[in-house]
Amino acid sequence: QLQLAESGGGSVQPGGSLRLSCVVSGYSYSGYCMGWFRQAPGKEREGVATIDNKDNTDYADSVKGRFTISKDNAKNSLYLQMNSLKPEDTATYYCASVLAYTASEGLGALSTLEGLEAWGQGTLVSVSS
């Protein structure tokens, strides 16, 4: 069974940076994308970033140019580097295995639980002054 565990969340001032990590264990079809989505209180789930097995990436417009998704297959890990953080980035961030084969398809699939193979317990990111 696939398991994902996020870490790296915390509190940061606007303009600051954080790096989220996600360790993946268990079996998963290697052709699927990996990605990050976020959920803020009272707001809809938002797909943030995806990466496919060719290392193609896709991002939500709200984070383009500020966030970078990457993975290290040798360490079974997924990362999200977040720079120039804004208060509106405050949310719980989840990593997920996405039922999609390309990064662009995966970004849309992140918005629904039906599009996910598995996801972690989340890590909280709070951006405030």
Image (spheres, rainbow, N blue to C red):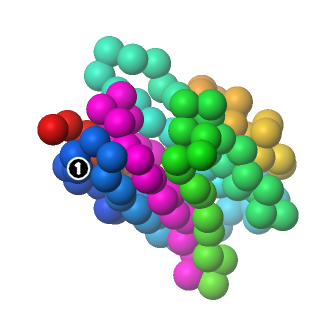
Give the quarter of the figure containing the N terminus.
bottom right
Residue at the image point whose x is 58% and y is 56% from the top = 68
Q: Which residues are magenta?
A: 75-94
Is residue 50 left or right of 19 when viewed as pictured?
Answer: right
Residue ID for mark 1: 12
Instruction: Please indicate, yes or no, whether residue 29 appears anywhere in the rendered image.
Output: yes
Is residue 58 left or right of 44 when viewed as pictured?
Answer: right
Tell me, yes or no, whether the highlighted magenta stretch contains residue 93. Answer: yes
Disc 1 crowd, CA 10 A, few/some/many (<14, 14-19, 20+):
some
> Looking at the picture, how far across and down is residue 76, in whole percent?
58, 75
Placement of 110 over or under 95, stated as above or below: above
> Looking at the picture, how far across and down is residue 33, in whole percent?
72, 53
Q: Residue furthest bottom?
A: 74
Give the quarter of the figure containing the C terminus.
top left
Query: In terms of depth relative to the viewer, which is nearer, 47 or 17?
Result: 17
Three-letter amino acid code of the residue under disc 1: Val
Instruction: Please indicate, yes or no, whether residue 4 appears anywhere in the rendered image.
Output: no
